[in-house]
Amino acid sequence: MPNQNSFSTIYAVARNAFREAVRDRVLYNLIVFVLLLTAAAIFLGELTAGQEARVVTDLGLSASLIFGVFIAIFVGVSLVWKEIEKRTVYSIFAKPVSRTNFILGKYLGFCLTLLVNTAVMGVGITLALVYVGGTRFIAGVWPAIYLIFLEMTIITAVAIMFSSFSTPALSALLTFFVFVIGHFSSSLRDLAQSMGSEAALVFFNVVYYLLPNFSNFSVISNAAVGQRPSASMLGLAFAYALVYDIILLTITTIIFKRRNFK
Amino acid sequence: MKYVVEIEGLSKEYETGFLKKKRSLALDDLYLQVKGGQIFGFLGGNGAGKTTTIKILMSLIFPTAGTASVLGKNVADTAMHGRIGYCPESPYFYDYLTANELMDYFGRLFGLDAAARKRKTDELLSEVGLAEKDRRRQLRKFSKGMLQRVGIAQSLINDPELVFFDEPMSGLDPVGRRDIRDLIANLRAKGVSVFMSTHILSDIEALCDEVAILRGGKLAASGKLGDLLAKDDAGRSLIVEVQGVNADAIRASVEFIAGASIEATPDGANIQILDESDLDAVLDLIRKNSGRLTRVEPAKLSLEELFVRDTTL
């Protein structure tokens, strides 16, 4: 008698989601990234004498973030939507697969893709730093890579949530807004405080608490000057991302469970 | 009696439009019971509600009213789905996977171990006639008929007790249709119940033990195929097939018999009488006109007539 449980279902769906990303050539962005980094290591160093390591760290981590966000948004919004549109969900939900386990499997499989992607980028930056003789920066690069990955997991969860009830184009746009606002929400709140407007303060406070605060994950400029974040900050960032991911996936699941697949 | 599918008062209403909502009733208070161990044909014209019903049974959509159970369990029971198989209409699968990989993935969803997945994959893909070399090709390179074969194979990977086929012959060539027809008949021989929706009437006649016909989301008729085909307004009426007579020459004499009618055929005539007691009079008439009796049979509707009658108003 087959032995089926939630864990093996989630694993099977996640495994397939990872395979889908690989076969759809999502990881090809790494080629562009490596080319960019190589060019930076070779050419930018000559323009910024003595600052090679700093430039490689700054450019490498910024590119990791931008590439990662791009993938998280555009692949994230189509992750579940594509299954509905292409009617592959018909065969899946006729099997002993709950909608919750399906969402979790798709999400975790894609997070694994992002993990591989950011880890390879981290290795690329490390090698580039070894090449330009900036090994002391390496200790700051890996915590930054780890935080970029955590940020990607939240962006993916936001993208999946929006795509569970709207079109991919609108979901991508909304997720991009969340990304941008999430990076500036604390600055916007500070600005509202200095303006002295009660309404603006209330509004930006709501935005600050409602949307994820991505400044918790931004340490690129620190890494570029050789600083590394504390262990407690890394731990708190993990807890913050985990709580956000759970909330977003719970909302997604609630919406997804009520959907009719016409 | 053990029913594998029980539907009680099932209705499904769709809302379309954004500002000005329009409602359309895809299923209207449907009641249906399907016995186990047989092939059940689910018929109806386009938009009659067949696929909507199957989707509700697969828990892909939710009914507006009513309840449905499969193998005695509510359709929302995920564990019950481990005992059924389903091949959707014009199936579409992950096109980046090969047929072998798809079967392996779906086998995992049923919790099959690696050896069982490999064994079932080889066995089922052979049974649906998918060539060895094609099993290692990505599904994006498959024709519609090949995808249909994979669809049928994947629906059987868990050795289901009950299989739902939505238009299983669609996209298949005549050889493919024969293969799948044999496969479905084999399933019944193994004790597997089959619930199948199709438009291909010859397949229904060849395979189905019982049928239900839907019209406008309602049940128009159901029961054993033979019973439905027996003309319900003339339970004892007979068709007498005659050769070597001129239909027009004997029309007046035939119509003298109460309720009898005659229809010319290329080599004679078909005479329909309402009761067996009129048979002697018709035989006398044939003899007098030097005709030859070729067949006497109970009057039945053809499946096509039945389908047209019950699927249109």
Image: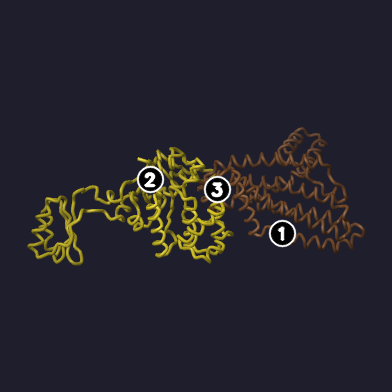
Chain colours: A brown, B yellow
Marks 2,3: beta carbons within 8 A: no
Q: CA distance from mark 2 to mark 3?
A: 25 Å
Amino acid at the residue labelled 2: Gly
Give whichever of A64, A15 is nearer the camera. A15
Which residue is identified by label 3? B111
Give whichever of A260, B224 is nearer the camera. B224
Determine which of the numbered discs, if any, sits on residue B91 in the image: none
Residue drawn 72% across and 48% down? A152
The quadrant where residue A116 appears: bottom right
Amino acid at the residue labelled 3: Gly
Instruction: Provide residue A177's location: percent of width, then percent of height.
Output: 71, 46
Q: Chain of mark 2?
A: B
Instruction: Provide residue A197's location: percent of width, then percent of height.
Output: 78, 34
Which residue is identified by label 2? B36
User: What is the crowding at mark 3: few (fewer than 14 residues within 10 Å), some, or many (at least 20)?
Assistant: many
Q: Are tags 3 and 1 found on a single chain?
A: no
Residue drawn 33% across and 50% down? B209
Q: Is residue B312 visible?
A: no
User: What is the crowding at mark 2: few (fewer than 14 residues within 10 Å), some, or many (at least 20)?
Assistant: many
Q: Nearer the viewer, mark 2 or mark 1?
A: 2
Instruction: Provide residue A46's location: percent of width, then percent of height.
Output: 89, 63
Q: What is the secondary structure assignment of the residue under circle 3?
A: loop
Q: Chain of mark 1?
A: A
Q: What is the secondary structure assignment of the residue under circle 1?
A: helix
Q: Is residue A191 above or below residue A144?
A: above
Q: Is residue A78 above or below residue A202?
A: below
Determine which of the numbered discs, if any, sits on residue A29 in the image: 1
Amino acid at the residue labelled 1: Asn
Image quarter hosting the N terminus of chain B: top left
User: What is the crowding at mark 1: few (fewer than 14 residues within 10 Å), some, or many (at least 20)?
Assistant: few
